[in-house]
Image: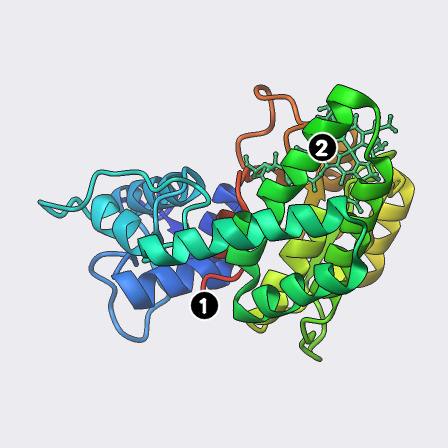
Amino acid sequence: MTEEASRSAGELARHLGVPITTLRTWDRRYGLGPDGHEPGRHRRYGKQDQARVERMRQLVADGVAPSHAARRALGEAGAPEDVEATDRVPGGSRDEERSYASRSRALRRAALALDPGQLDHILGPSVVEGVVPAWTRVICPAMRHIGERNDATGHYVDTEHMLSAAVTAALARVARPSARPNILLACVPEEQHTLPLEALAAALAEVGQPCLTLGARVPVTALTDAISRTGPDAVVLWAHLPVGQDPLDAVLSARPRPAVIAACGPGWPTTDLVPSILRPTSLRQAVALLAPDG
Ligand code: B12
């Protein structure tokens, strides 16, 4: 293997759009580092090492649990082939599933009854138990239900607003780490659906990862200004409504250029994005990619 064909950890991280800390974690935890590394010498990933890490990144982005993904990337015989449903709670028992479903129904009823006390009563403990299951199992199904009712009848805007505000408040109560944030979260211009990024900020905080959240409708100039002022390692852009490539192009040409750029939400074009841009499709995947130690 020539030196040119091999890559340092930093070069590979940039090439794949994965934080360098993620590469180190995958190496330490799953043995996905460079083969034949000599102590005292800089680690360089050869062609095969790179292919393994690239496969790992793809599998994790497809929703495979990192430990399973690593076994498959390493080509272990008997490694599980199943791709986990992207928002399934790993290890969740049937009883747990039933409990989430009944809490979600109760949340929906409390929202329809415009009952703030009850909303808080359900949301508070659910979020304390774990942001990812609270968001994916309790909150999202209720949100989808209210969204569909609203869409079908033109009513329930009040319900949607009230539920959104209660969810925002519950997620904001998750204690934020005091360290300087190195991840920036923002909605694309004109986008007001902030809740998924609020869930991401809370889920990252829960595992000790601070982030800077710019909120709704962030103009491209504000985004690039914030990048040049704070130099984040990762930028996550949320688009629920259809959006073009402009905000991504702005981040790609921002200085310093963030090592990791993730385009999240159903609003992005399904094709034609730059390959190094991450496309996590669930909260769990986004957390696994941005905070692998969590
Ligand atoms: C709450 C809500 C609002 C709130 C947002 C409040 C807030 N602070 O976020 C308010 C009232 C502001 C709002 C406004 C509007 N909304 Co609205 N809203 C919703 C609602 C009910 C929930 C949004 C949400 O949080 N979704 C997240 C979850 C619940 O959705 P999900 O499908 O399960 O998510 C999937 C993925 O996105 C992903 N995922 C979920 N979370 C995360 C997190 C991360 C990090 C990742 C990577 C992935 C991920 O996993 C899920 C499974 O695939 C949706 C209904 C819906 N189904 O989403 C409508 C919905 C998104 N809204 C819609 C519309 C049309 C509007 C308005 C245009 C209404 C209007 N006439 O003004 C405006 C648009 C404003 C704008 N310019 O952005 C439509 C969008 C249709 C479309 N695709 O074009 C929807 C789908 C409702 C509908 N059925 O018609 N809305």
Labels 1 and 2: the sequence-earlier one: 2
Q: CA distance from mark 1 to mark 2?
A: 34 Å
Determine the residue located farthest toward the left in the rendered image: 77
Q: Nearer the viewer, mark 1 or mark 2?
A: 2
Image quadrant of ligand 1 equals: top right
Q: Amino acid at mark 1?
A: Asp
Q: Which residue in the structure is indicated by mark 1?
A: 293
User: Can residue 149 be seen from the camera position used here?
Assistant: yes
Is 104 left or right of 124, judged from the image as shown? left
Is 257 left or right of 204, judged from the image as shown? right
**Viewer-proximal residue, 11 or 289?**
289
Identify the residue shown where x is 80% and y is 37%: 188
- Residue 169 numbered mark, or none: none
**Coloured how?**
rainbow
- Residue 200: image location, x then y, percent: 63, 55
Identify the residue shown where x is 50% and y is 42%: 15
Q: Amino acid at mark 2?
A: Gly
- Residue 147 numbered mark, or none: 2
Residue 189 against residue 242 in the figure, above or below: below
